[in-house]
């Protein structure tokens, strides 16, 4: 949310940055990833804590991609409390799962420009612009229906319970995430 000077902090981006910077938690994460394992919660929390002390997060931040489980939510609550940065709000981006499936399986990247497109939702002109310029519409290997169906099952089992968790703490705000990017963004701004 650059227009509000609030950094959007993605756990994946943080992990890659911590590894590149050679931080203590980044080095631990890199070793674990090199062995083919998932980075444990305590290391991710360490990476988050390293990131949240940076100056751009002093007046707030949006944490994207974490927490994904109730345990992570409790650990994050403890971490933020110890940093005297309590959680203000948890945003639930509410979208029909059929639309979400099309958003994910339809994602393509133009090989020339790097622009993110969608075969279901981008205009034909945008898609043609890439192809007619000599580019290809590239699909990520994991953006297939089988993989995404599995990720949605994991979401239902592990992450969806966080809706009730944050509702019970009076922290949950829901944003209807269907429609144009501009409309959804405005709805997000309205709840913040």
Image: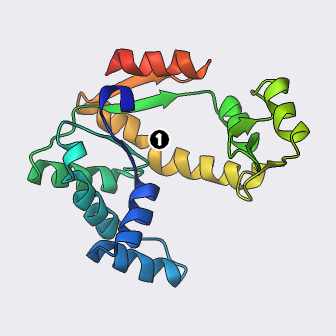
Q: How is the image coloured?
A: rainbow
Q: What is the x, y in percent for residue 79? A: 18, 55
Direction front: furthest residue: 133
Count of labels in the image: 1
Q: What is the x, y in percent for residue 16? A: 44, 65
The residue beneath circle 1 is 160
Q: Is residue 25 above or below residue 168?
A: below
Q: Is residue 178 above or below residue 59?
A: above
**Residue at left 30%, top 35%?**
6
Horizontal relation, residue 60 to residue 139: left or right:
left
Q: Do we see residue 101 in this rendering? A: no
Q: Do we see residue 29 in this rendering? A: yes
**Residue at left 76%, top 48%?**
112
Name the secondary structure under disc 1: loop
Horizontal relation, residue 150 to residue 75: left or right:
right
Q: Is residue 104 above or below residue 93?
A: below
The quarter in which the C terminus is drawn is top left
Q: Is residue 27 above or below residue 157?
A: below
Q: Residues within 10 Å of mark 1 (few under 14, many from 20)?
A: some
Closest to the observer, 71 or 113: 113
The quarter in which the N terminus is drawn is top left
Indicate the quadrant where residue 116 lies.
top right
């Amino acid at each position: 949310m650059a227009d509000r000077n609030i950094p959007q902090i993605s756990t994946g981006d943080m992990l890659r940055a911590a590894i590149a910077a050679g931080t203590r938690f980044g080095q631990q994460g890199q070793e674990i990833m090199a062995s083919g394992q998932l980075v444990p919660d305590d290391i991710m929390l360490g990476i988050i804590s390293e990131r949240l002390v940076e100056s751009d997060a002093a007046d707030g931040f949006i944490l994207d991609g974490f927490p994904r489980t109730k345990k992570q939510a409790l650990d994050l609550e403890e971490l933020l409390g110890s940093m005297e940065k309590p959680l203000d709000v948890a945003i639930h981006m509410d979208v029909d799962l059929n639309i979400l499936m099309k958003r994910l399986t339809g994602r393509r990247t133009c090989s020339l420009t790097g622009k993110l497109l969608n075969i279901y939702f981008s205009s034909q002109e945008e898609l043609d612009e890439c192809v007619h310029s000599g580019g290809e519409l590239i699909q990520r290997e994991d953006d297939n229906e089988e993989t995404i169906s599995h990720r949605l099952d994991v979401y239902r089992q592990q992450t969806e319970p966080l809706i009730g968790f944050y509702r019970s703490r009076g922290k949950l705000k829901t944003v209807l995430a269907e429609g144009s990017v501009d409309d959804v963004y405005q709805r997000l701004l309205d709840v913040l």
